[in-house]
Image (spheres, rainbow, N blue to C red):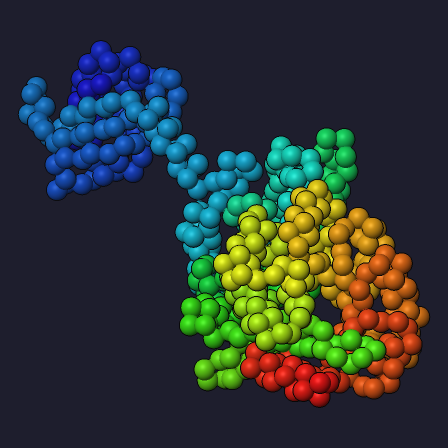
Amino acid sequence: MITLYSATGEPLYRNPAARSVVRATAETLHEHFDSPLTMQMLTGANVNEINAVAATQTAFGKRWHDITARRCFDAVSGDHAWLISEVDVSKLKATEERAQFLAEHDTLTKLPNRNHVTSGFQARIDQLLASGRRGALIFVDLDHFKDVNDTLGHAAGDELLVEIASRLTTLDPEQYAVARLGGDEFLLLVGPIKENLTPINIANRIRNAVSQPVSIQGRDLKVTPSIGISMFPDDGQKIDELMRHADLAMYHAKDNGRNNFAFFSQDLSDAMEQRISLESELRTALAEKQFATYFQPRVDVQTNRVVGAESLVRWIHPTRGMISPATFIPVCEACGLINALGKTVFEESVCAQVEWAKLGFDLRLSVNLSPLQFGEENLVQDLITMIEQNQGSPQHIELEITESVLLGHDQATIDKLHALVDYGFGIALDDFGTGYSNLAYLHRYPLGTLKIDRSFIQVIDTARPIVELIVSMAHLFELDVVAEGVETQPQLESLKTLGCHEYQGFLFEKAIDFAAFTRLLENESRLCA
């Protein structure tokens, strides 16, 4: 499409292609182009050539044309003119706009995505701050959303996400900007915060909106949100910093029971920094073998002789000394180090069992398996390999699990436990009485030992009926029963009268290293000779 326009914008000539798209023969340059391009050509005295993609008004409606405009002279009058060639690129423009939309929006909910948040939300924050107004960035994570996908399928999960997205976008479109970051995470930019709405009011509005039941596949589903809030400018002015702070607050809300909200505070940031630092130190500790296996004696209640030991891990830090497992075990579980740490403790326990057997001490060692470690696909083979490589005796190794391992009642758990028992390992149920304490556990699973939690032993005078019941159940199912945390002689005397088999605790000895435990065994052997 080629058109010659006068310097003031009147049409002088059009070729057939150009004539086929104009709305009127006399259509001027200004009427044809819906763009600042017109003013540039009509007022830019020093502009000789212009290349642009611009919106044009045509007989077929608004179209996008790739335009080349050159300053020239009209051959008839000799006056300045503009020679303009146009190519319709509307389809290409629509494709580009679609690609741009897909790049910055979630395909499921059509909400802005993380790419858009980085630029779009930051521009809005800058605008609010420039006008001296405050706002909030709010993380919303759906609690237990995975359960919906697992039970009803991903189609139901997608339908739920679309409904939640709709609810969030209709809260207050003028004040709230909503994005989906992925999965079940949404981000809201709220601002300016109106005088009649506090951040707490906003959080409650979000929680109420999300928590309303949703009808999907003929079922009424209800999900609750965990909400984290960072305020600007108080908690930051850049989108990355505000998102990081809101995310920390959201996880704090989850830790406090879910269906809750929390505000960012510097304490949360400090705790995360400490956590990251601790995780780094733990990786170094594993590589440099700073962990040591200690052993707490398991003692026969009636004879007060050592009959076994529980293996307990200790972190011997090069500068801070011994660090409590309560400090580092949860971090190991959260960052994926627990399996490597568990293997280290197990192998050292097997080596200790072998060495004591060589000295003539027939001991059973109990080694803890965390739920995450128990869930490892290759657990059984890994344990068998370590036993065989170190020539240990599986009949002298007892694996301690907690009730949480058994909650699923799934066949895989049953098969794994039977595979371990068939090889020769014993299975002990640790902390019995503090969880569900389901009697079916004692019937369904191949358990050999019950361990009574220390919390009952500490108050055995008042908890005696519970301890007596646990011991009686153990006898009924022909299980060994071990009391943990025995610290006083009266506690031990009570266990004797109840028929408890073994105990461990500070009354006899704390957890000690291999050398000290060996001396303990040798001293006891000499005394009994």
36 is higher (above) or lower (below) than 1: below
Residue depicted at x 80% and y 53%: 441
Give how far across and how far down residue 199 sits, in percent. 64, 62
Quadrant of the drawing holding the C terminus = bottom right
Q: How many marks?
A: 0
**Residue 15 found in image quarter:** top left
**Residue 466 found in image quarter:** bottom right
- Let me know if residue 145 appears in the view: no
**Residue 512 found in image quarter:** bottom right
Seen from the viewer's position, the closer of residues 70 and 104 is: 104
110 vs 480, left or right, is: left
Please, which residue is most extreme toward the front here? 529
Give how far across and how far down residue 135 sits, in percent. 55, 61
Residue depicted at x 43% and y 47%: 115
28 vs 430, left or right, is: left
Seen from the viewer's position, the closer of residues 388 and 52 is: 388
- Let me know if residue 518 appears in the view: yes
Give how far across and how far down residue 365 sits, in percent. 65, 68
Residue depicted at x 63% and y 84%: 522
523 is higher (above) or lower (below) than 328: below
Give how far across and how far down residue 27 sits, in percent. 29, 21
Seen from the viewer's position, the closer of residues 384 and 159 is: 384
Quadrant of the drawing holding the N terminus = top left
Residue depicted at x 67% and y 87%: 526
